[in-house]
Amino acid sequence: MKQLSAAVLTAAGLLLPAAADASPARFLDQSTIPDLQRAMDRRQLTSEQLTRGYLRRIEELNPRLHAVVQTNPDALAAAKESDARRRRHSARGALDGIPVLLKENTDTADRQTTTAGSTAMLGSRPAKDAVLVQHLRAAGAVVLGKTNLSEWSNFRSTAQIPGWSGVSGQTRNPYALDRSPCGSSSGSAVAAAAGLATVAIGTETDGSIVCPAAATSTVGVKTSLGAVSRSGVVPITAQHDTPGPIARNVTDAALTLSVLADADPASAGAAIPKNILLDRNALRGKRIGVWRKGHTGIDQQADRIFESTVHTLRSLGATVVDGADVEDISWSVKPDLLPALLTEFKHDLNAYLAATPGEHPRNLSELIAYNDQHRDVEMPLFDQNLFLEANATDGNLNDQTYRRHRAAATGIAQRSIDDVLASNGLDAIVTLSGLPASPLDRPGDARFLSSTRNTSVAGYPNITVPAGFAGQLPVGVSFVGTKYHDAQLLGFAYAYEQASHARQAPRYLPAA
């Protein structure tokens, strides 16, 4: 959009309406970070007004959504500091004054908590901000608060309910409150979709950004492993964990990623996405493979949306290559992946707990005991079998058996993508991100084989972008590529987004 409405530019209170047909809310939903920056540069809007507007939207909508665990008591002070910088003509860049929500597994050394959704961690007091938070603050972003998640990022139980935590209950999908928001970054995706912040930060180990973003008609960026530092994020495994932005449009996601991107030990000096070019013609002349196997033929409406996506890619000048199906590795990696993950989880979580100040369990054994002692709060719905299995390992990352498991799993996953790209001369692969959201009390269709297992185990990027609606429920498509092709995939996602205009604001319907 070229300019904000007069209603948005008066008082922050006019940013509040939640109804889909309320004009100010619609403008807020459609505004990009550059739109907001222009308005603030022209003194038509202040960061303080914008922050107050989001805080009041959270107050209004969050009782239905349970997306936000807490708001930052220092957010307005940070917004006022941003406004002062702007008056001095010393704004720090594209994110200065922009309110951002963090997934609540992200450390902040302030008055907010970092619990990973568990009441066991309410006494945790991180000594410093996560590296990604340091980057956000240095860029002038306003840390608005923290979002709900699947407790322990969905790695406590195989029966876990997406979007549920002991700290904040069940996150709801804003498109239909009876439908799953997916997980584990459910709160971040729902908050972005509902306009509770300009952008939110999620983390992914396997599907935790891509799935909730697709289910909420938002853009989710699962980055290459190491493109964004994981330091200060409550871990599952350093071999998979990847923070990334969730936003209502590719522009905001790309600008945020350019601030977050930072050399991490896993990146080994490779190029990271600091400068991201967004071009409507990015797909022209590119070869895009179509991955249908395991994804289409399950839901007719999702198939219709995907075929429309393929048509759009052709219209944008891409050469569409059919038959670029990536192998389903779910079974081939299972003998190696689960033992590796369990060992890594015990090692990484124990190290995090031991190093984090405050009153909380100091290791996985103590955490298991806490859950047993507080079953009514922590285990009313599902158990902690993954915790128990992880604790039974030795957590030794130098063990040769463990190393063989990890090398085998990662190698299978990387080859599954790289071989298809190379054999077909492809620049990227496109596929469905998921099916329309299932009811909260039922799992998704097991016939759908998510692309995130391949990309998460490989450490490769996976970017989901809104593609359409099956009735009232969003459907997304994913652009997949090899490691450190994040910027290129964002360019493809942007070109597609600008042609498809698929996103719609949520209507908070009680049922689909």
Image: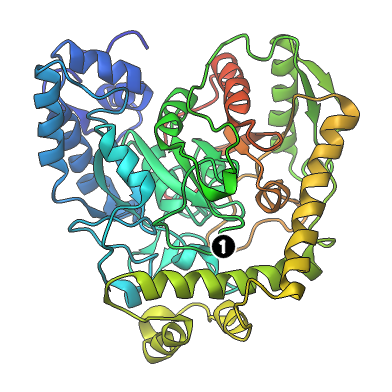
In this rendering, is residue 115 above or below 232? below
Q: Which residue is mark 1?
A: 237
Residue 142: quarter of image: top left
At horizontal 39% and vertical 32% (from top left) the residue drawn is 259
Residue 95: quarter of image: top left
Residue 507 visible to an observer of this rendering: no
In this rendering, is residue 415 above or below 217? below
Is 444 on the left-hand or right-hand side of 174?
Answer: right
Residue 439 visible to an observer of this rendering: yes
Q: Secondary structure at mark 1?
A: loop
Q: Position of residue 367 (x, y in %)?
A: 42, 82
Is 241 on the left-hand or right-hand side of 170?
Answer: right
Q: Amino acid at mark 1?
A: Thr
Is 323 on the left-hand or right-hand side of 431?
Answer: right
Is 362 on the left-hand or right-hand side of 180?
Answer: left
Q: Position of residue 168 (x, y in %)?
A: 33, 64
At horizontal 57% and vertical 38% (from top left) the residue drawn is 269
